[in-house]
Amino acid sequence: MDKEYLLYVTINNVNGKVYGGQHYGYRTDNYIGSGTSIFIKAVKKYGRSNFTRKWLKLKIKNMADLNRLETRLIRSLKYKWGKRCYNIHEGGSGFDPFKYMSPEDKAKRAGLISSI
């Protein structure tokens, strides 16, 4: 089985908030997202088992298309869900959360992500 360019929406089953993003991997991955610190804190607070990830059924051919479609997905989620959307940035690989972090903050963030 080859890796795929994937889009997903993860739903917080406790409060109904949503998070959308992209993933290059397998549909069988346990991946639910690793984006904003708000989303990561929510996963820690409510527990990973209280989140459901849904893959969008699209055939995406390359990273450029994935980035473009992720941007559209996040715009749509923000429009529909408003403040109930965890996404802060526009997506499309346009945001690097580690770019401005100190080495200590990077290590802390990596620990949060790996504990989910």
Image (cartoon, rainbow, N blue to C red):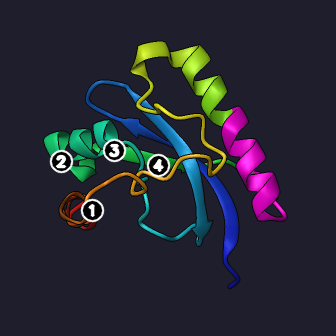
Q: Nearer the viewer, mark 2 or mark 3?
A: 2
Tag 2 residue: 44
Residue range (magenta): 58-72
Amino acid residing under circle 4: Arg
Q: Which mark is first along the chain, 1 or 2?
A: 2
Taking the image as shown, residue 97 lies to the left or right of residue 8, namely left
Task: Say which amino acid is labelled 1.
Answer: Lys
Q: Are marks 3 and 4 in contact (CB under 8 Å)?
A: yes
The reply, left or right, for residue 105 in relation to residue 33 is left
- Percent x, y for residue 20? 53, 40
**Front: mark 2 or 4:** 2
Magenta-colored segment: predominant secondary structure: helix
Asked which secondary structure carries label 4, the reply is: strand
Which amino acid does the dot numbered 2 rest on?
A: Lys
Alpha carbon distance from label 3 to label 4: 7 Å
Q: Quadrant of residue 76?
A: top right
Quarter of the image with the C terminus is bottom left
Image height check: is 98 above or below 10?
below
Please rate how many residues cluster around mark 3, counting C-alpha atoms within 10 Å: few if below 14, some from 14 to 19, many from 20. many
Q: Quadrant of the N terminus?
A: bottom right
Of marks 1 and 3, which one's residue comes earlier in the chain?
3
Residue 106: give its label: 1
